[in-house]
Image (cartoon, rainbow, N blue to C red):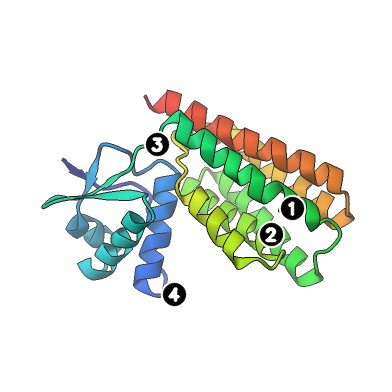
Amino acid sequence: MTAVPEGLATIGDRISLRERVAVSLRAALVSGRMVPGTTYSIPVLADQFGVSATPVREAMLDLVSEGIMAAVPNKGFRVVALSDTDLDEITELRRLLEVPTVVSLAGRLDRKTIARLRRLEKEVHVAAASGDVVAYVEADRELHLTLLSAAGNPRLVDMVGRLRDQSRLYGLEQLAAEGVLVRSADEHRDLIDAIVSGDAASAQAIMEHHLGHVRGLWARGREERS
């Protein structure tokens, strides 16, 4: 069967259609709105986006190359399922990459980066409070990658971005309704405060707790979705 994920992000014109479709699809994947075991048709997705099939097909092929989607001959594309072991490995890799990087940034961010992080933190919080899970996932991703980019290692940023895109957060709507996402969003503010003040120890503790919190959201969402 083919399906259409609800709540895809609106296609904008600031970047290419292919890139924008990929951004929206990644948000739908990470938020769990596109689920394993369901086949998604290119024509149906293109119709929902209001674009031709070409940018949707190109975006899907990008996701296939990243191991996020799998092609289903003559039908469309299917989300690659993740096991608990997969999620544990993703979390461990993120800890190894992100925690020491964040610690190294304590007291070193410039004003422009701080201002951008503050803006993104507010966007994450607003999205969490309103229950807009797609906006939440997108803003959360941009915040984390913006922070990591301050370390000046684009390969690290790319690796973490790919790890995040391989994640799945099922049942976010229910978690948002319970205020769980707001509490997770609050951790971003505390993390930025610690980094700006130069408190490396607090930044490390908050980052480690945040990654553990996110892994807990994955687990809970999977249980509620099953």
- Name the residue at 85% across, 43% down: 201
Q: Which residue position holds label 4?
A: 15
Quadrant location of residue 176?
top right
Q: Quadrant of the N terminus?
A: top left
Q: Amino acid at mark 1?
A: Val
Q: Quadrant of the C terminus?
A: top left
Label 2, label 4: how many angstroms apart (C-alpha)?
22 Å
Dot 3 or dot 2: first in sequence order is: 3
Q: Which residue position holds label 2?
A: 147
Which label was assigned to residue 82?
3
Q: 114 or 205, which lies in front?
A: 205
* Image location (x, y in percent) of residue 171: 45, 33
Mark 3: few/some/many CA within 10 Å (<14, 14-19, 20+): few
Comparing labels 3 and 2, the label whose residue is closer to the camera: 3
Q: Is residue 77 above or below residue 148?
A: above
Q: Which residue position holds label 1?
A: 102
* Image location (x, y in percent) of residue 222: 44, 29
Mark 2: few/some/many CA within 10 Å (<14, 14-19, 20+): many
Q: Amino acid at mark 3?
A: Leu
